[in-house]
Amino acid sequence: MRKTVEEQFLFDFYGELLSDKQKRVLEYYYNDDLSIAEIAELTGLTRQGVYDAYKRGKAQMRLYEDKLGLYARFVRQREGLARIADKLAVLAREDADKGNQTRAASLFDLAREARDLRDSY
């Protein structure tokens, strides 16, 4: 099985909505990077039981995402903040080239704030 960044974000968004068993299995899998066999040993479940909890939990998170769209909104917001930061940086460079250092500094500050906000997610 291959973990994806999207799956890890889905777990961050929807993990608390899963059953206790699914949450525990996926927490070990995503956060602790344990294998199915290692999780089975830690939890006392069979490997098949761990795999079933993993598959059901993953399917449940996809269902939540289809209904709520939190991850998709998160991605759109991050991309939008990146575009805003890039446009502000371009405007700041143009103002700096025209000799308007005060406005350029303000625009650079806004670009930095937008990038910081994007990176804080």
Image (spheres, helix red, strand yellow):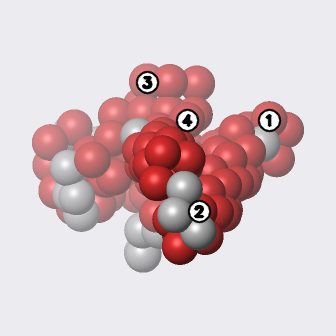
Inter-mark Cα distance, 1 to 2: 42 Å
Q: Which residue is mark 4?
A: 13
Q: How many marks?
A: 4
The relative height of residue 64 versus residue 85 in the rendered view (above or below) is: above
Which residue is more in the foreground, 70 or 22? Answer: 70
Categorize mark 2 by other alpha carbons within 10 Å: few (<14), some (14-19), many (20+). some
Q: Which residue is mark 3?
A: 20
Judge from the rendering whether residue 77 lies leftward or rightward of residue 118; answer left or right: right
Quick one: label 1 or label 3, which is nearer the N terminus? 3
Residue depth check, mark 4 versus mark 2: number of the one nearer the observer: 2
Whether tag 1 and tag 3 are in contact, CB under 8 A, the answer is no
Quick one: label 4 or label 2, which is nearer the N terminus? 4
Residue depth check, mark 1 versus mark 3: number of the one nearer the observer: 1
Quadrant the N terminus occupies: bottom left
Tell me, for residue 77, which label it has, or none: none
Whether tag 4 and tag 1 are in contact, CB under 8 A, the answer is no
Residue depth check, mark 3 versus mark 2: number of the one nearer the observer: 2
Q: Secondary structure at mark 4?
A: helix
Q: Secondary structure at mark 1?
A: helix
Inter-mark Cα distance, 4 to 3: 15 Å
Q: Which residue is mark 2?
A: 95
Quick one: label 1 or label 2, which is nearer the N terminus? 1
Q: Is residue 117 visible?
A: yes
Q: Amino acid at mark 2?
A: Asp
Q: Secondary structure at mark 2?
A: helix
Inter-mark Cα distance, 3 to 2: 55 Å
Estimate the x, y position of residue 121 in percent, counting from the top left: 47, 41
Inter-mark Cα distance, 4 to 1: 10 Å
Q: Quadrant of residue 14?
A: top right
Q: Which residue is mark 1?
A: 68
